[in-house]
Amino acid sequence: MQHLIESIKYNKDRRFPREELEEIISRKEEAIPHLLEIMRELQAHPQLAEDPARLDFMYAAYLLSQFHVTALFPILVELFSLPEELLDMIFSDILTDAGGRMLASVYDGDLHLLKGLIENREAGEYARAQGLRALTILVYEGRILRETAVGYVKELLTSKRDDYDYYFNAEMVCTAVDLYPEEVYAEIEKLYEEEALDPYVILLDEVQATLQMSQAVAMQHKHEQVSYQYINDIHAEMEKWVCFQPESSGKIELLGDQLKQKSVKVDPKPGRNDPCPCGSGKKYKKCCGK
C-alpha cells in the first residue's frame, strides 16, 4: 500500500491516476492509516504544501472524506483554522469548492469543535464560511436537527455578531436561507437595514424569494445540488481538473484556479470565485470582496 500511495504523491505527467485510486478504494481499510498519516504530516508541517507538484494531500483529503473517516475531522478543523495565506497555499479554491463538504463527510459528532471554527475570528473568513456550509449539510444528512442549527444561526446573527465582519455576516444569511430563514428573518432584515453585511454575496430579495416557497421545497432544491452533499466520488470530484489535462499549459500550483470545467449559470451578482466586476482581472474574493 505504501508503494501505491507513493506512486501518486506527485503529479508528474498530468495524468489522473484513476487505476491507482480505484485500487486504493478497493483496499480501503488498509489505505486509511496511510492516508491519515499524510494528513497528519500536513497538519504538523503545513509548509510541505509549498511543493506545487505534490498532490497526495488532495487525494488523501478526498478519499478520507469519501470513506467518512471521522479521524480526519479534527485535522481538517485545525488546518482550516490556519492563517488565510497558509490555508490558501494548501487548498486554494478547493476550500470553497469542497471544504464544507469534506468537514460534513467526516464529522465526528463534536458540534463544539465545528462551532469553534465558525466563530474563530483568527481563521480566514472563507474557512469559517465552510464551517457554516458543513452545518447545513449535516442538517440535510440528518446528523444535526434543523432546529439546533437555526437556533445557533440566530445566536450568530444576534449576540455573536460582529457588525464589521461584512462577508461572514452575509454568509450567515446564506446559511439561514439554506436552512429556511423563517425564524430569523427579522434578524436578517436588521442586518440589511444597518448595512452590516456584503450585499454582493446575497440580496434581501433572495431571502424573500426563498420564503415564497415552502420549507420542504426550498430545502429539497438545495439538497439536490452537489455542493450540499457529502463527498462520495473522488473521480467525479477531481478527474476533470485542468491540471490533469496533458495539453494544458497551466501550472500545477494554480490548481485552485484550474478546478473542473463546468457550465455555470450567469448570476447578476459576483460569486466568491467570479471575476471581480471592477475589471481588475482578479477573483471577487481576492479584490473588492475582501
Image: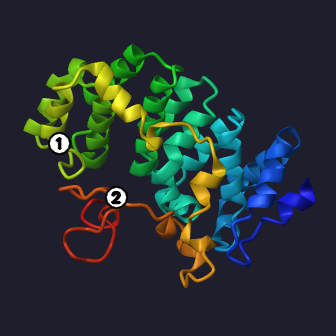
Identify the amino acid type marked 2.
Answer: Val
Task: Classify residue 69 by image quadrant.
Answer: top right
Task: Classify residue 143 by image quadrant.
Answer: top right
| Res 264 label | 2
Residue 164, given in percent of the width and then of the height, sits at 23, 46
Which image quadrant: the C terminus?
Answer: bottom left
Left or right: 188 as drawn, with respect to 16: left
Q: Name the residue: 46% across, 24% down.
A: 139
Task: Classify residue 197 by image quadrant.
Answer: top left
Q: Is residue 109 visible?
A: yes
Left or right: 76 as drawn, with respect to 131: right
For label 2, the SS is loop
User: Where does label 1 land, which residue?
Assistant: 196
Label 1: how many residues lie within 10 Å, few (<14), some (14-19) or many (20+)? Answer: many
Between residue 257 and residue 157, name the one nearer to us: 257
Q: Is residue 181 above or below residue 74?
A: above
Between residue 24 and residue 43, name the one nearer to us: 24
For label 1, the SS is loop
Residue 29, given in percent of the width and then of the height, sits at 85, 38
Left or right: 211 as drawn, with respect to 42: left
